[in-house]
Amino acid sequence: MTSAPFAPRRIASLLPSATDLLFALGLGEQVVAVSHSCDHPGAVGRPVLTRSIVDTSASQADIDRAVSEAVRAGRALYAVDGTLLDALRPDLVVTQGVCEVCAVTPETLETAVRFLPGCLPASGVLSLEGKSVAGILEDLRALARAAGVTDQGERLAEDAQARWNAIRPAPGARRVLTLEWTDPLFYGGHWVPEQVSRAGGMNVLGAAGTDSGRTTWDAVAALDPDVIVVMCCGYGLADNAAFARGLLGRTEMRAVREGQLWAVDANAHFSRPSLGVVQGAEVLAALLRGTALDGESVRIGV
């Protein structure tokens, strides 16, 4: 007789995108702990397992310096409360291997529980790895399988793919620069170039499935994008609008002079490998058509 698939009853999520996916799968009641960055409404009041070693209330320049120094020194950017994790005894812990700056990695998790033998059986840890839209949907399926709701995961993935395919690209193929950080400048990577392309734009910096990267204002000026979209990682619409307003002095940029400087909600639609990336492409398509969706983007300087 074949045994039934293991279905976790207690799940710990160490990153916001996993928490979003777990609730989308209808598994919210099984989430026993979350990360300090998890902002899904259902995560409120759950035990928090992580903290950042960087002061995220600091300026972008100071955050970048702190992160760079930690990476050079080989220090993890996040700490995991291994004692609390051991006490909660989850059946499944979800982490990620996409970006060491964005959330807890498997290595950080392993360090936290090194002296707690038996706390995390290997079969009970799932690392999400998707760096593209297809990868995000595969992560959704993998999470659903690990949690024992395979059919629900397949339905959600199929619905998301259908919605992605149905996006009507904006005409004109305008040249778009996405900024994941403004001081210093970082352009968007991973799935963001796919979002731009699906929306009907031409991405001027960054390639689908690759990391975001540093650039300079001289390099950006040479590219002369038609549209600049500020989507600083880890921030919502209001903060990104503030960061974008800080660029209004960049009048050497045609996009700034012509009122094509925009801000969007990075947390909801661009930074996280979750189903929100589909809506993010819809937001970009509307923005490029000149029919921006209320509450989804802000045009700066007009």
Image (cartoon, helix red, strand yellow):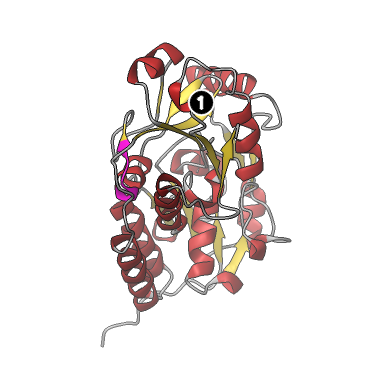
Q: Is residue 38 left or right of residue 99?
A: right
**Residue 223 appears in which quarter of the rendering?**
top left
The image quadrant where one finds the N terminus is bottom left
Q: Residue at x 31, y 52 (%)?
A: 169
Label 1 CA crowd tier, 10 Å (few <14, some 14–19, many 20+): many
Q: Is residue 12 left or right of residue 223?
A: right
* Residue 250, above or below 194: above
Which x, y percent locates residue 10?
Answer: 56, 68
* Residue 272, above or below 165: above
- Location of mark 1 (residue): 256
* Residue 109, above or below 256: below
* Label 1: which secondary element: helix
Residues in magenta, as a range: 198-202
Which x, y percent locates residue 257?
Answer: 51, 24
Seen from the viewer's position, the closer of residues 89 and 294 is 294
Magenta stretch holds residue 200: yes
The image quadrant where one finds the C terminus is top right
